[in-house]
């Protein structure tokens, strides 16, 4: 549980795993565009790939929400 609450580690995961591969565009952005475009032709592997590359961003969002709620 300590790992997912470590802001530095989560940011590092976002910058590496969350954006890899970097060229021609970050992988997670391509998958998000695909889903927002209707996701035609997506297979289970593509969904798993989106979850794998998107998890660091979800954790970062979670940490941000927790910080905001803690400030109140």
Image (cartoon, grey):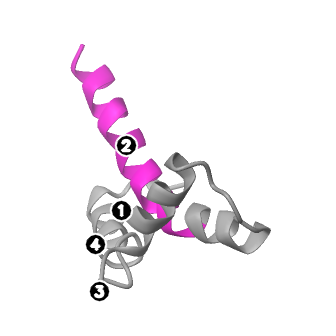
Going 26% across and 64% down the picture, which residue do you hit? 8
Going 57% across and 64% down the picture, which residue do you hit? 50
Which image quadrant is residue 33 in?
A: bottom left
**Secondary structure under the numbered disc 3 in the rendered image:** loop
Look at the image and give the residue range highlighted in magenta: 52-72
The answer to whether the residues at label 1 and label 2 have Cβ atoms under 8 Å apart is no
Of the numbered discs in the image, which one, if any, rests on residue 15?
Answer: 4
* Most frequent secondary structure within the magenta stretch: helix
Q: Residues within 10 Å of mark 1 (few under 14, many from 20)?
A: many
Viewport quadrant of the C terminus: top left
**Secondary structure under the numbered disc 4 in the rendered image:** helix
Which comes before the other along the chain, label 4 or label 2? Answer: 4
Which comes before the other along the chain, label 4 or label 3? Answer: 4
The answer to whether the residues at label 4 and label 2 have Cβ atoms under 8 Å apart is no
Which image quadrant is residue 46 in?
A: bottom right
In the displayed structure, does residue 45 sit left or right of residue 1? right
């Amino acid at each position: 549980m300590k790992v997912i609450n470590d802001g530095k580690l989560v940011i590092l995961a976002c910058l590496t795993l969350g954006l890899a591969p970097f060229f021609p565009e970050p992988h997670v952005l391509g998958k998000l565009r695909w889903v927002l475009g209707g996701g035609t032709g997506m297979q289970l592997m593509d969904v798993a790939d989106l979850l794998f590359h998107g998890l660091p961003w979800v954790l970062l969002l979670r940490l941000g929400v927790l910080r905001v709620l803690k400030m109140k």
